[in-house]
Image (cartoon, rainbow, N blue to C red):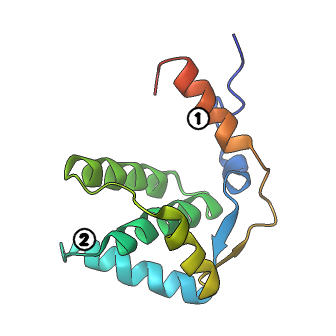
């Protein structure tokens, strides 16, 4: 059995998980999207995609476990409502093109994928 590279996940390892982080403009946009979501305003699929992406980039870069938990709850809630990720690549590319996210210098390629693969293979996902 393979060992989970992120178990237990240490707070200091959070910034290594994802390839992008928010810029100042990205943080402003993220807060607008998050506010719209919590006010239960209808968003487009692209906006929901961007909310998912920006939320996890924000919470892991800031080593905030409560925000990571909220991101998981939001993703589960959207899935329960039938609002699934669609064209995520295009949403991410748009965030890059608008300079709302930039490459994360602390990113360790493949770390998060190995964790997800471990979870899938151990049937605990």
The image position of residue 58, as x and y in percent, is: 55, 67
Residue at (55% x, 65% y) in the render: 89
- Give the answer, above or below, for where 26 lies relative to 75: below
> Are there few (<14), some (14-19), or many (20+) residues within 10 Å of tag 1?
some
Pointer 2: what residue? Answer: 38
Q: Quadrant of residue 86?
A: bottom left
- Give the answer, above or below, for where 110 lies relative to 34: above
Residue at (63% x, 85% y) in the render: 97
Whether residue 10 is visible: no
Residue at the limit of the structure toward the top, as seen here:
1
Front position among marks 1 and 2: 1
The image position of residue 109, as x and y in percent, is: 78, 50
> Are there few (<14), some (14-19), or many (20+) residues within 10 Å of tag 2?
few
Whether residue 113 is visible: yes
Marks 1 and 2 in Cβ contact (< 8 Å): no
Could you tell whether 35 is left or right of 86 in the image? left
Could you tell whether 101 is left or right of 74 in the image? right
Tell me which numbered mark, 1 or 2, is placed earlier along the sequence.
2
- Report helix, strand or loop for mark 2: helix
Pointer 1: what residue? Answer: 116
Q: Quadrant of residue 114?
A: top right
The image position of residue 13, as x and y in percent, is: 72, 47
Q: Quadrant of the N terminus?
A: top right
Residue at (39% x, 73% y) in the render: 46
- Report helix, strand or loop for mark 1: helix
């Amino acid at each position: 059995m393979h060992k989970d590279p992120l178990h237990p996940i240490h707070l200091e390892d959070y910034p290594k998980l994802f390839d992008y982080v928010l810029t100042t403009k990205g943080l402003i946009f993220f807060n607008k999207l998050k506010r719209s979501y919590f006010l239960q305003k209808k968003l487009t699929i692209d906006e929901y995609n961007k909310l998912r992406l920006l939320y996890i980039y924000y919470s892991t870069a800031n080593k905030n476990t409560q925000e990571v938990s909220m991101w998981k709850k939001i993703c589960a809630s959207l899935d329960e409502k039938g609002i699934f990720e669609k064209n995520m690549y295009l949403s991410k590319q748009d965030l890059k093109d608008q300079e709302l996210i930039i490459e994360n210098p602390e990113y360790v390629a493949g770390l998060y994928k190995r964790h997800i693969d471990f979870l899938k293979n151990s049937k605990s996902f």
